[in-house]
């Protein structure tokens, strides 16, 4: 299993990256990406703290670790430049905090993230068919989430992706150790959102594809 949306105490999570790594391993995950909430005030600090740790701990932990960010509450006009900046600092994965109905997010955030070339759009809420179509064209993944407050629109996201061919991911979006769900729970969330068994398997394949890409950075 792979989880590409993990929060730590470098941001708003409740556990250090090392503790998150330990819980991920215990739950059976073979790779995780840390994606703490960042904006212009803390992006460099988070990545510079995280990058040395993942390079060393990946060698000994039994879990492949990657350094990412979740760009959060950034004005849509600034999102493309923020994506570029995060990558220049060393982020191996860049996602954007999408227009979840569980939070106040600026209109236009989903579109800016897709146009800006984020790797994936976290919990995109009531994403439009046009936005999903653009995500398909630009190969920006849309997230199906295990986090309850964001999962309310999972079914809508699956429907939009099915109509347009937009690629999907399934992530935990967790803040604490017990947020790492097992394989059976992941599958149930996917099928409960309306995925076919084949779509669910493809989401797992998509995560492996992203990890393969990050390994080359």
Image (cartoon, grey):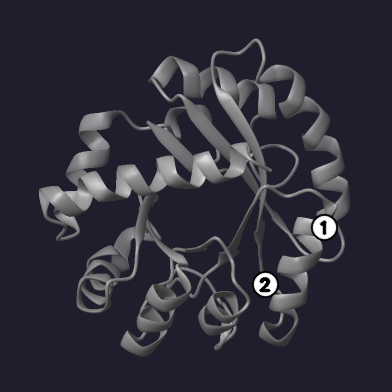
Vertical position of residue 107 compared to residue 83: above or below: below
Q: Please rate how many residues cluster around mark 2, counting C-alpha atoms within 10 Å: few if below 14, some from 14 to 19, many from 20.
A: some
Q: Secondary structure at mark 2?
A: loop
Does residue 17 appear anywhere in the picture?
yes
Which residue is the site of mark 1? 88
Where residue 150 sits: x, y (%)? 40, 61
Vertical position of residue 56 compared to residue 93: above or below: above
The extreme left residue here reads 196
Q: Quadrant of residue 34?
A: top right
Relative to 171, is 58 on the left or the right? right
Q: Could you say which disc has been placed on residue 73 in the image?
A: 2
Q: Nearer the viewer, mark 1 or mark 2?
A: 1
Where residue 32 sits: x, y (%)? 53, 34
Residue occupying the point 78% across, 36% down = 50
The extreme top residue here reads 60
Where residue 173 sits: x, y (%)? 48, 47
Where residue 70 sits: x, y (%)? 63, 57
Spatial CA distance of label 1 from label 2 is 20 Å
């Amino acid at each position: 299993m792979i989880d590409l949306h993990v929060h730590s105490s470098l941001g708003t999570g409740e556990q250090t990256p090392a503790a998150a790594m330990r819980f991920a391993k215990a739950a059976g995950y073979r790779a995780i990406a840390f994606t703490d909430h960042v904006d212009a005030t803390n992006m460099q600090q988070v990545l510079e703290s995280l990058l040395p740790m993942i390079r060393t701990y990946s060698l000994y932990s039994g879990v492949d670790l990657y350094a990412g960010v979740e760009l959060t509450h950034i004005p849509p006009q600034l999102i493309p430049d923020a994506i570029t900046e995060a990558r220049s600092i060393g982020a191996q994965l860049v996602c954007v905090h999408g227009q979840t109905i569980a939070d106040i997010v600026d209109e236009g955030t989903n579109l800016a993230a897709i146009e800006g070339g984020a790797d994936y759009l976290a919990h995109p809420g009531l994403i439009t068919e046009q936005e999903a179509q653009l995500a398909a064209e630009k190969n920006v993944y849309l997230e199906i989430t295990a986090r309850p407050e964001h999962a309310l629109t999972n079914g809508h996201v699956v429907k939009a992706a099915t109509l347009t061919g937009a690629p999907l991911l399934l992530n935990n979006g967790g803040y604490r150790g017990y947020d790492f769900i097992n394989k059976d729970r992941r599958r149930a969330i996917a099928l409960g959102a309306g995925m076919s068994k084949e779509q669910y398997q493809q989401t797992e394949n998509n995560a492996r594809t992203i990890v393969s890409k990050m390994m080359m950075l």
